[in-house]
Image (tube, helix red, strand yellow):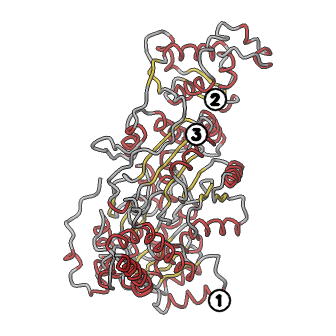
Amino acid sequence: MTESHPALTTSAFAGATSAGNPHFILEHTFGYTEFRGDQEAIISTLVAGDDALVLMPTGGGKSLCYQIPALARPGCGIVISPLIALMQDQVEALRAAGVSAAFLNSSLGFDEAQQIESRLLRGELELLYLAPERLLQPRTLDLLERAELSLFAIDEAHCVSQWGHDFRADYLQLSCLHQRFPEVPRVALTATADQRTRREIARRLDLESARHFVSSFDRPNIQYRIAPKNNPKRQLLQFLNTEQQGNAGVIYCLSRGKVESTAEWLQQQGFNALPYHAGLAAQVRAEHQRRFLREEGVIMVATIAFGMGIDKPDVRFVAHLDLPKSIEAYYQETGRAGRDGEPATALLLYGLEDVVKLSQMAAMSEGSEEHKRQERQRLDAMLGLCEITSCRRRALLRYFEEELAADCGNCDTCLEAPATWDATDAARKLMSAIYRSGQRFGAAHVIDVLRGADTEKVRQFGHDKLSTYGIGTDMSANEWRAITRQLVVRGYLRVNAEAFNALQLTEQCRPVLRGEEALQLRTLPKTPSTRATKRDTRAGDASAEVSVQEQPLWDALRALRKSLAEERGVPPYVVFHDATLREMLSARPRNTTEMLAISGIGDSKLAKFGEPFLALLREFEGELSDHA
């Protein structure tokens, strides 16, 4: 899927000084020896002064694609970022790597902001992060015109698209950068965008003639699991207790009230869970986000207001307790798990009530009829992903126009093929009950009619006299809900949000009612399974379990990392990622040369943190010798 480019090697940067050579910067600043995927081609494009549009999955190394060229070119790189937390997070990590970085946003006082502006004009900054609304102020644009700039990086570029799931109106005005700074290269980056969103990003940011880089959307380390809601609290608790004890994760809910109640319930179950939504006071949100980033094993229960751009590498799971509005939203939100490349799980629990709620929201939106139609299509695609019986990853990637050569082997449908059954007669009964009750009632009432329930509403409308009354007593309400949900997803029924969510027949159901078409539906599991399943082995050695013998040293390495992080007021992963600690555990470096060979350790981090970790490793080696 990647645009073709000439072969790029170290010689592509020949003639650059070592300090301005991207390979030198990669190794000595960031501690890595090789570029991944399209990184080198993107960096080469920007170093040469050309523009780029980059689609790369979360965890694919997007940040290096603009950070390295900003360091390799003269001047300061300007990064446009939508969230204050993301700016602070990235600036902390850059400073730990020895980069002169800063941000300008509303969290700074006047004097502090003035100092940063002065440093920019004196040429002392290598990277400066700005929110779009700050950048677009005339005073800021005038300031930038007086500074030497290396590039503009527009992060989370899908925010520019009204078809995207995180639309930000301020992003629409960023095309002015091309007019005011025609000589400064620009790069727009996002982790997810379908064809429509991609075209709109290019058009609105004036990047249609830029080089486009589309990396694989595959995140093989994430295990995708989707299940119908059947006592969702019990399902979630089983998942957390059996697989995620002590792990950091994010749980997404559709409403603020559900966020609050879920976080409180998890706290009662003994989990370190915090709520996050736009209705909380700003200082509460900031404190909860700080704890999530800096403490270990915190579970954030949140609306989609949380998470965009959060650079926490060790999120081991993302769970959705409500259906996302689109596959783009689902991909973006699940992508916040496993950024370090180690195994992670994306669990989604959904039900018919989610379909009803999201259909209502789409129908009541203030967008045009075309926009509403597109939103409905996106919801239908998301529902289709839930109900398929084939490999979920292949379907997910196909949505982004990428074909996987074979089934992934790391999603629930690959690991345990779903059972199906001949639901033709049951579907006819349901359709008949909907038709005979006038197509004016929701699923709960229709199911009551089928199951012969003696309710006031059934009696009020005389539905206990219908020929379909009581013909479905052989199935539970849960089973009827599953049939209803699948028929809605497949287009045999529709939910009319403008008629009190009434179930109605579509033209597609006629062949079934006439006996001309048979229906195979997914069997509803008798006991919902969220048990641990076989893991993908492609994540590499870093995902291997720590042995019993290594556990004391592993705990000591993590404790030292936490102590050093607390001293500096930064998250633990700003010191070293888990993958770096695992490599340290395996390689047992004995000196600075061997320590520098560990992935993720550059010159600055070696100088700041190398000696304490070498001392700890020597201490453990000494203890082993004493016991030999």
- Decide which of tag 2 and tag 1 comes sooner along the chain: 1
Q: Residues within 10 Å of mark 3 (few under 14, many from 20)?
A: few
Q: Amino acid at mark 3?
A: Glu
- Decide which of tag 3 and tag 1 comes sooner along the chain: 1
Nearest to the observer: residue 224 or residue 48? 224
**Inter-mark Cα distance, 2 to 1:** 57 Å
Q: Which mark is residue 124?
A: none
> Relative to 54, is 77 above or below?
below
Nearest to the observer: residue 125 or residue 591? 591
Question: Residue beneath label 1, please?
Answer: 111
Q: Is residue 70 left or right of residue 459?
A: left
Q: Where is residue 355 drawn, in percent x and y?
A: 59, 36
Residue drawn at point x = 46 percent, y = 38 percent: 385
Q: Residues within 10 Å of mark 2 (few under 14, many from 20)?
A: some
Q: Where is residue 11 drawn, in percent x and y?
A: 19, 77
Q: Quadrant of residue 553?
A: bottom left
Q: Where is residue 250 drawn, in percent x and y?
A: 56, 55
Q: Is residue 565 left or right of residue 192?
A: right
Q: Secondary structure at mark 3?
A: helix
Q: Where is residue 418 drawn, in percent x and y?
A: 43, 31
Q: Nearer the viewer, mark 2 or mark 3?
A: 2
Looking at the rendering, in which quadrant would you find the C terminus? Answer: bottom left
Question: Residue beneath label 2, please?
Answer: 496
Q: Nearer the viewer, mark 3 or mark 1?
A: 1
Question: Residue beneath label 3, please?
Answer: 369
**Inter-mark Cα distance, 2 to 3:** 16 Å
